[in-house]
Amino acid sequence: MNISTPFLATLIVSLFYYDNAYSQQRESDYYQINQIYVPEEISLEVGGLAFNDKGQLGVSTRRGEIWLIMNPENPKSEYIRFAHGLHEPLGLLYHDGSFYSNQRGELTQLIDQDGDNQADIYRTITKWDLNGNYHEYSYGPVLLPDGQMLVTLNLGWVGYGESGSKWRGWMLKVSQDGQVTPYATGLRSPAGFGINAQGDIFYTENQGDWVGSGRMTHLELGDFAGNPAGLRWSSEKGSPVSLKVNDIDDTRNLSLYEYQNELKGVKAPSVWFPHALMGISTSDINFFSKEMGPFEGQMMVGDQGHSKIMRVFQEKVNGVYQGVCFPFIEGFSSGVLRIVNNPKNDAIYVGQTNRGWGSTGQSSFALERLSWTGKIPFEIKTIKVHPEGFSLEFTQPVDAASAQSLSSYQITDFTYSYHHFYGSDVQNKERRNITEISLSEDRLSVLLKLDQFREGYIYEIKAPGILNQSGQSLLHNFGYYTLNQIPFGKSNLAMKKSALSNEKKGSIKRMTKQPTVWSNQIDIAIEIGTAPGLKFDQPNLKVVAGSKVKLTFNNTDDMPHNFLLVAKNKANEVGDAATKLGLDGAALNYVPETEAVIAHTNLLAPHEIESIYFSAPEVPGAYPFLCTFPGHYLTMRGVLTVTPKSVL
């Protein structure tokens, strides 16, 4: 979840990159989403969720309240306000009879001394510096096995994440008596973090400056996860990090994995979530229980902007975590921020909010219950690396003919640049060849041997042709595997490094020089820029039919944008086509090849300017214009009104 930038805050487009067999299977056949009752007078903009020892569900809200839902399984449960007056608490923990919540400026213990379900004591455990920047969110806490608590502090947004508030961009340990121990830095917007069954700590990150795409990182003491703003505090007493801001140099066109191999202390992600293909704003981490279907022990990872939950399987190879992310379920009513298990019955409760952080779910907030119907979906259960390729495990036996056909699979690898700019295009994309297919005797797994491996790359693994014994296609037929290590063993796969390429394709509908036939005559010059909240600064433009137009687009925002003028009533069609460009989108500037596009700019980086020339349509009417960077087109749009030519 990138609840912390205007970009991810307003992305509200639902992206399903591939066509899955929904005519045969639907997510709702296996997992159902049900609304939890919320009284009309309560704005339950969820910041945190935690069950107490009475089975009551505590809900902290962005409006500074904590509510107790007395019986969350009851359709009309009573709500009691437990606490109020907090400063945007974005996390909640219940431990040893008390709730704990991390406000923007402090970690607070809330104690109900007289047992009336209302907090009597608000005890400050420790305080955080604040400069008043809207981006200085604070998250947590999460309980550690030794009784300490983990918290994370979001970077402020000034320039490239610079912040004058101490420990911003860090994960910290806090004892019950308020002793703070710095743990790791390089974090940008660490809204989701958790601990697996082995006691290892993971956090989720969102695309932004220094962050090519959403990702999950296994954090160990002293790790640096990529964003250098937090290194400002690495010389402070107790810091386990030795790197300094000046140690980080992004002029060498490397990936974060390559940088890790050259600079001690840098930590590459264990799992990447390719931007817009999997999500846009990763949020909470939770784990599947055996009562939630065939994925016991795997991770649930929320996405706030796409109002969905993804599924993650990880493995350790040569002592290093890596793994794969899959789609799981979408369609929540608002932006997914928190996910918690009910310890009484293992139901999953999903807390949601989208005010200022737009989402595909259009409700301002929601609390919903996710439950398993008991039916087993036909899915890729796991993907594991093998010395010569990848092993795909399925939840049901597969049809042998489809599983042994080369045409059933497509594998592509790619990476992202590590630089201070906001996000990254897909880099160095190559199609991998499958050299051999081996199907297991029980037909529950298949080994795909490849022509080549590239460490540090993300592997898009698609299986659209796979069928089960009943002829059904997979519910979700793709996943993205992050390859940090190749297991030891016999291998004929040679590793290869290729030069990164940023080449972008042009278009005859993008004229950056005035046509010579215009004879240096321009009828109208238009200057258009951006406005906060994924908007153009001029939503309404007007030209005369057939006029010669020079349009200058100034991207004053902190994220990439383009400008497309399209045919009448074609904005949604073009925007949807742009999102389906997938891994090829960046190279095409997210401009789909369709007659509906009249004129367009390239995809412009923050603060870039481009002028284009085009002739206005001859037919009067309303012509939409929009930005087609993934997720933008439903909000970043306007209308060019073409008026009739004057009749003398």
Image: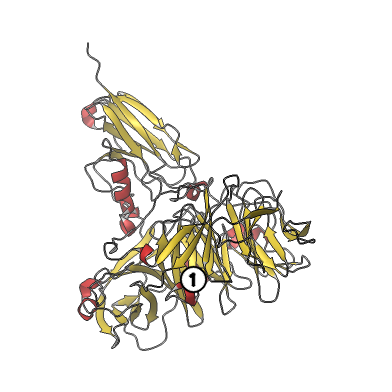
Q: What residue would you read off at disc 1?
A: 299
Q: Position of residue 58 (x, y in %)?
A: 64, 60
Q: Would you say residue 270 is visible in this rendering? A: no
Q: Secondary structure at mark 1?
A: strand
Q: Position of residue 167 (x, y in %)?
A: 68, 59
> In the rendered view, how is the structure colored?
secondary structure
| Horizontal relation, residue 618 to residue 586: left or right | left
Taking 340 as reference, is 504 above or below it?
Answer: above
**Residue at x 30%, y 55% (from the top left corner):** 581
**Residue at x 33%, y 72% (from the top left corner):** 378
Taking 567 as reference, is 63 above or below it?
Answer: below
Q: Would you say residue 550 is visible in this rendering? A: yes
**Residue at x 48%, y 47% (from the top left corner):** 363
Q: Nearer the viewer, residue 139 or 187?
A: 139
Q: Hey, which residue is sitting farthest top in the picture?
A: 648
Q: Quadrant of the C terminus?
A: top left
Q: Position of residue 112 (x, y in %)?
A: 76, 60
Residue 473: image quadrant is bottom left
Taking 39 as reference, is 228 above or below it?
Answer: below
Q: Position of residue 444 (x, y in %)?
A: 32, 82
Q: Nearer the viewer, residue 394 or 633?
A: 394
| Horizontal relation, residue 258 to residue 448: left or right | right
Q: For the residue marked with disc 1, what is the amino acid?
A: Met
